[in-house]
Amino acid sequence: MKISKCSNGDVNNAMQEARYLKRIHGEDPLRRHSIVDLLDDFKFRQHYVLVFEVLGENLYEHIKSPKFKGMKTEQLRSVAKELLIALQKLRSVGIIHCDLKPENIMFTDADCQKVKIIDFGASTEKFESRYTYVQSRFYRSPEVTIGIPYDAAIDMWSFGCIMAELCTTRALFPAHDELDLLERMRITIGMPPQWMMEGSNKRNKFIDRNGKLIRSQLSNLQPGLPDRSHPISRQVYTAFDDDFTDFLEVSIQLLSDPPVL
């Protein structure tokens, strides 16, 4: 049993997290969804207490271990399956996690084959203007980066970034800021579609008067690198076999049409 205690401004987020988890568990009492089990929740004085099951290490700790050399196919397939089951459940109940990252995915077994998603404190049911700054930077989708409405696809984007990192041990987009993040997306998978950029109220932050992407002052990328027109270039990510690359291309892609919200 693990106890998470929230107070003051965090209480509403904790209550919302409890509400979302109860909805998920209510639709799947057998707990087949690979999402952390909420055992109890209650108020105590000025605190709101969430009681969770005890899980193992998280993926971030696993990746940063000196012994970690990248997951082999069998382990990678098992973790991917568990996460896709969880994301399918979230989509079916209308919840967007909004902060899927290695720190929020924990192993449930000693063999590190099974995982569960945790931390629904930043989750939402739909895009809202007060939830525009979501997702940790390395796993942040183009929609969130440029500031347009998003849907559950942003969780799939994060999933793809995590899968790539589990294979190579390196973050797919290790950006210093949002300008650097967008440049890294550009050279790896190409620029976001025109409809995305036109719908962004932050367009002037990213695009100069000549229609060129503004370069981050923190960028350490070689200047003048061309756009990639093919997701997850095989020339760049030679560690991926073709099947896994195809899988990532489905997970991490820039949509050609606006999402239906």
Image (cartoon, rainbow, N blue to C red):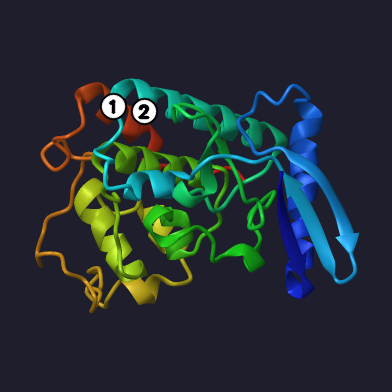
Residue 112 place in picture, x, y as percent: 44, 30
| Count of residue discs | 2
Local SS, label 2: helix
- Quadrant of the snapshot with the N terminus: top right
Q: Residue at x 73, y 52 (%)?
A: 17
From the viewer's perspective, tell me whether residue 189 is left or right of residue 121: left
Circles 2 and 1, Cβ within 8 Å, touching? The answer is yes
For disc 2, the marked residue is 76
Query: Residue 61: x percent and y percent?
Result: 41, 49
Q: Is residue 242 visible?
A: yes
The quarter holding residue 251 reads top left
Coordinates of residue 30 in the picture (x, y in percent): 74, 21
Asked if 127 appears above or below 218 in the picture, the reply is: above
Q: Residue at x 76, y 33 (%)?
A: 25
Q: Observer-nearest residue: 82 or 42?
A: 42
Q: Is residue 27 left or right of residue 229?
A: right
Query: What amino acid type is highlighted by mark number 2?
Result: Leu
Q: Amino acid at mark 1?
A: Lys
Q: Residue at x 33, y 50 (%)?
A: 64
